Image (cartoon, coloured by chain):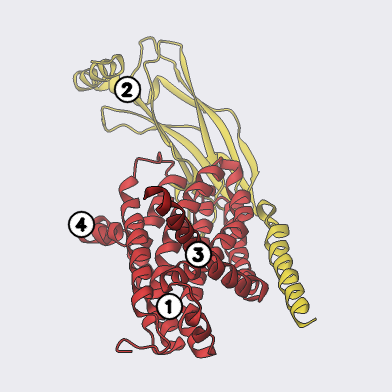
Amino acid sequence: MSLRRRWAVVAAAAALLSPATALAAGGDDVSVSVDRATIQTGLGKKFVFRSTVRNEGSAPVSGLIAHLNILSLRAGTYVDPEDWSSNRTRYLGAIPPGGSVVTTWQLQAVNDGSFGVYVAVLPDSGVAVAPTTTPTIRLGVTSRRTLNPSGMVPVALGIPALLAVLALAVRIRRRG
Amino acid sequence: MAVVEAPVEHAVSQRRVSGWTVVLAQELRDLWLGGRGLVLCFVFSILVSVIAYLVASSTGFNFLEQRESASLTLQAAITCGGLLALLVAADSVSGERERGTLETMLLTPVPRRQIAVGKLLAALSLWLACFVVAIPYVWLLGRDVGVVDEALVAGFVVGTLLALFLVSVGLVLSVFASSNRISLSVSLFLLLALLAPTQLPSGVEQAWAGELVVNTNPLTAGIHYIGRIVISGHGWSDDVHLLYAPVLAACVSVLVAIFVAGRFMRLRGGVSG
């Protein structure tokens, strides 16, 4: 049995035996923070932020799950969080008293507009406690318009133009 | 005896080689110096330009993965290049018949099978030209994700196999068709029919019947193989079963086309003729 799984079993057993411990694992003794309050980026750009889960209690905690969420702050913008990040759920290892775990979240802006991003942490025991969440990161994504994506325009115009000139030259040569 | 026979055999084989090369040279001159090939390549380049620009726009916004965009452009190039090669092959006998130039060719001392080989290779040259035209587009779309080499090699192999299959089918249709219009329209319909399974919902392709259709249809199998290499990053041999249909179709159709042309290429078209 792996160490992580062993910790999870211990945490689950503890949760069953003592609701107070479970509550602590899900909330009171655990604090979660993020390394920034706002992010401004452009459509299609990748960006990262970090969350820190800190064990404020006197006993080690384990079996915590951190989950990334994103939503539009304005009605009418469809958001599929899976499009923004392919790795939104992290299973955290044991955290000693006073210790912390830093998680790096990588996202890609696939919609423009104003968004709220936060991380929720909850115990893997599934006990009915409110998840601990980070403060919301306010994310602004500006739209981007380019007429030359991937440098395609010179090729997209140049190759047909070259072939047109060649075809014309052959035609003129034949007539001449 | 062997000493005496060897030069004779050598002379015969030389004559055979020169027969199809003469036809090939003549067909290439007609296609490329006549201007038809360049015009078709021009039309092809416009089509690929539009597709590549659209997928590049999407890629710029990262709505479409770059691997997917390179694969999509390559697949469009293979399909359109194959279509043009098919149309040239479908015109090769029935078109000459209608233009009144087939008689001259049939009167030459070149065996009809060699005429067929020359015409097949000339039609294939259009696919090769289309592939060369498509290279810069694929390079631009795939360079950032490092799939250019894989995409170009897979595209060349699969595209050439499919083009061989299509030009052979086009030649057979052209030999039997009573008019050029019939030959071209049947060829076009055939290509559309072969491409139809690509429009099936992905769920249908997962079922055994759908998978069977995809794997046995040379076009869909070849296109899926390119997708596995370019998009999924699979190894060359991981999905080699998808190459069975294109390889088999190319080999069988070339042999059938050469046989049919040798046996049935006549001044009058039609099945009974």
Q: CA distance from mark 4 to mark 1?
A: 28 Å
Q: Is residue B43 visible?
A: no
Q: Nearer the viewer, mark 3 or mark 1?
A: 3
At which x and y percent is residue B80? 51, 67
Task: Please tell me whether mark 4 or mark 1 is closer to you in this view.
Answer: 1
Q: CA distance from mark 4 to mark 3?
A: 37 Å
User: Which residue in the structure is indicated by mark 1?
Assistant: B188
Determine if marks 3 and 2 fall on one subunit.
no
| Secondary element at image label 4 | helix
Which is closer to the viewer, label 3 or label 2? 3
Q: Chain of mark 4?
A: B
Q: Please name the amino acid that badge 4 sits on.
A: Trp
Evaluate if marks 3 and 2 touch, with contact meaning CB atoms under 8 Å apart.
Answer: no
- Quadrant position of the C terminus of chain B in the picture: bottom left
Nearest to viewer (mark 1 / mark 2): 1
Q: Which mark is residue B208?
A: 4
Are there few (<14), some (14-19), or many (20+) residues within 10 Å of tag 2? many
Instruction: Say the numbered circle drawn on residue A63.
Output: 2
Tell me which label, 4 or 3, sits earlier in the chain.
Answer: 3
Q: CA distance from mark 1 to mark 2?
A: 61 Å
Note the chain letter of the red one. B
How far from the left and from the top, in percent, is residue B263? 34, 76
Q: Is residue B248 above or below residue A64?
A: below
Residue at mark 1 shares a chain with residue at mark 2: no
Secondary structure of the residue carrying tag 3 is helix
Q: Quadrant of residue A93?
A: top left
The disc labelled 3 sits on which kind of residue? Leu
Above or below: residue B174 compared with residue B195: below
Which residue was labeled with disc 3? B121
Q: Nearest the camera: A164 or B199?
A: A164
Can residue B182 be seen at all in this image of the molecule? yes
Identity, as a three-letter code, of the amino acid under mark 2: Gly
